[in-house]
Every structure is written in structure tokens, then in C-alpha cells.
Image (cartoon, rainbow, N blue to C red):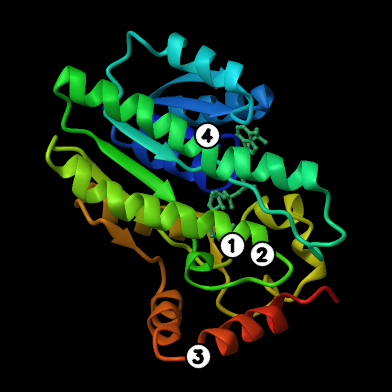
Amino acid sequence: MHVLITGASRGLGREFAYLHAKQGDHVLLVGRDATALFETKFHVERLGGTATVFPYDLTQPTHRLALFRATEQIPVDCVINNAGIGVFGSFLETSFEDESRMIALNIEALTHVTKVYASRMKAQGIKGRIVHLASTAAFEGGPWLSVYYATKAYVLHFSEGLTEELAQDGIQVSVVCPGATHTGFESAANLEQSRLFLRPGVMDAPTVARIAYRGYMKGKTFIVPGFGNAWYIFSTRFLPRRYVTRQAGEVQRPR
Ligand SMILES: NC(=O)c1ccc[n+]([C@@H]2O[C@H](COP(=O)([O-])OP(=O)(O)OC[C@H]3O[C@@H](n4cnc5c(N)ncnc54)[C@H](OP(=O)(O)O)[C@@H]3O)[C@@H](O)[C@H]2O)c1
């Protein structure tokens, strides 16, 4: 299997690469940090897979086009749209440039990558898989991470719509909704100043990736790693939206 993974230089993306490597798959590793991607490649090969590194910044349309061109001859049959960032802080104090970059990565790049590879799958008759990383954040407003939460709501709704559309072509779409997970995400998003990652129940990246992997390989469309996260999402259906948002704000408020 040829598996393209965005954000494979660390965190969940790297774990997905290792899981596919154990099956002898060829993984296409995308991210900006070439050194870290080559580290992932080194471990992938030790685990029995093969890997190619594509050091591209997915927020840049020209880099995306370069990626699409460089992979033209590879019959990609699984795409894991995992790269994503958060911007933490008061909306009136965060920089629009950072938020714009987040929207470009979490929404625009994810949509573009999916359009190109799903179209190729259809044209080549590949019954492939598209996997999107959303979050438990997709189900509520998230004070101090308001734009991030909104990007994940986009990912969830976009994936759910596509599930029906692409099923006609035999392409499986899965959306993964992890809760807080220890990766590089919390420091990249400056989240050490919030209580979000200090609460009990924060999961580790290998466990989250393993649950997600099992789910999408079985063809599940909606995957929530961890009982606590699944219960939380379920419970928000029965609570007033304003209350749920306020609770999220209590947990995330900068210390
Ligand atoms: N960790 C959590 O608590 C959590 C919870 C729910 C959902 N998620 C979602 O899960 C996904 C993976 O997150 P993670 O926790 O593994 O985060 P992470 O450890 O911070 O890794 C993020 C990955 O995205 C890549 N990336 C960032 N900017 C990029 C860009 N401009 N172009 C290409 N790649 C870029 C990074 O690589 P480079 O720096 O090399 O570019 C890195 O490999 C994200 O979509 C995130 O929103 C995470």
C-alpha cells in the first residue's frame, strides 16, 4: 500500500507512519522539517516499510503543487490528512497571520490534498482511503482556541459529506476525533499555559494512532479514540450549547 501522511515529522503523523511500516507499506512523509522526516524514514525502514520524504510547507500553494507533481507516478491508495496546528490565546491578542496560516493548513491544504488524491484514486480505479484528523473540538465552541475549534468543525462536516459522495467510487472516508493527546501540539500551540493538557485522561500518541489505524483499516467512518472522549462527545448532545462552551473555556482559560 502507498500511504501519504501529512505532518509525519512528529506526533500522531509519525505514529501512523510506524503502524503502516509494520505492514510493509510505502509511506510518503510530508512536513516542513526535513531532518525530522528523515528520522521518521529511518525508523520506518527499521520496522519493515519503505519511505520517501517530501519536505513541503502545505500552507504554500506552490509547495502543494510541487508535492502533487512529485507523486504523480505513485498510485497513492491511502491519504492521512493529519498535519494541523493550533493557535492559543485571546482572539483579540492572537495574530491574524498565525490564524490565517492555521486556516491555510487545517482547512485549505486538507481540502486541496483530498481533492487531488481522491480524484486520482477515482481516475485510476483505486478503492482507496482518505483519513482526516478532526478533534473532539469539532463538537463545540472553544474559548481561547476559537479559530482552531472552528477549523475542526469544518474538517468533521467536510468529511461526513464526503463519506457519502466518495462511497459511490469505492473510496472510504474516515474522520478521527481525538481528545487532548500528548504530542508536540501543546507546545507548538503554546498550550502549556492552559489546564487542557494537565487534566487526567490525556492520551498518548501511540495509543491514539493505534485506535485510529484499527478503525480506518476496518472501514469505520467516525473514530473517537478513548472511552472518555466518546462519552464526552455523546454527553454534549444533551447539554445546552452555551454551557458546554463555558465549560471548555473554564478548562482552557490561560493560567
Ligand atoms: N495533540 C492533540 O491534543 C490533538 C487533539 C485532537 C486533534 N489533534 C489533531 O491531530 C493532528 C496531528 O496533531 P499532533 O498532535 O500530532 O501535532 P504535532 O505533534 O504538533 O504535529 C503536527 C504535524 O503537522 C506538521 N505541520 C505543521 N505545519 C505544517 C505545514 N505548514 N506544512 C506541513 N506540515 C505541517 C508538523 O510538521 P513540520 O513542523 O515538520 O512541518 C508536524 O509533523 C492535527 O490535525 C491536530 O489538530 C491533535
Tell me the distance, in whole angstroms, between the alpha carbons under discs 1 and 4.
Answer: 17 Å
The crowding category of the residue bearing disc 4, from other C-alpha atoms within 10 Å (few below 14, some 14 to 19, many at least 20), is many
Looking at the image, is mark 3 or mark 4 earlier in the sequence? Answer: 4
Question: Can residue 26 be seen in the rendering of this structure?
Answer: no
107 vs 97, left or right, is left
> Which residue in the protein does label 2 denote?
146
Ligand 1 found in image quarter: top right
Kindly identify the amino acid type of the residue bearing the numbered disc 4.
Ala
Taking the image as shown, residue 61 lies to the left or right of residue 35, namely left
Residue toward you, 12 or 48: 12
Could you give the CA–CA distance between mark 3 and mark 4, rounded to whole angstroms? 33 Å
Q: Which residue is mark 4?
A: 109
Q: Position of residue 208 (x, y in %)?
A: 45, 59
Q: CA distance from mark 2 to mark 3?
A: 18 Å
Q: Residue at x 54, y 19 (%)?
A: 54
Q: Dots 3 and 4: beta carbons under 8 Å?
A: no
> Badge 3 is on which residue?
240
Name the one closer to the observer, 168 or 42.
Answer: 168
Is the shortest distance between ligand 1 and the CB of mark 4 under 8 Å? yes
Give the alpha-carbon distance from disc 2 to disc 4, as whole Å: 20 Å
- In space, the residues marked 1 and 3 are separated at their CA atoms by 18 Å
Q: Amino acid at mark 3?
A: Pro
* Callout 1–callout 2 Cβ contact below 8 Å: yes
Dot label at residue 149? 1
**Which image quarter holds the N terminus?**
top left
Dot 1 amino acid type: Tyr
Counting residues from the start of the chain, the first of labels 2 and 3 encountered is: 2
- Mark 1 and mark 3 lie on one chain; the one further toward the N terminus is 1
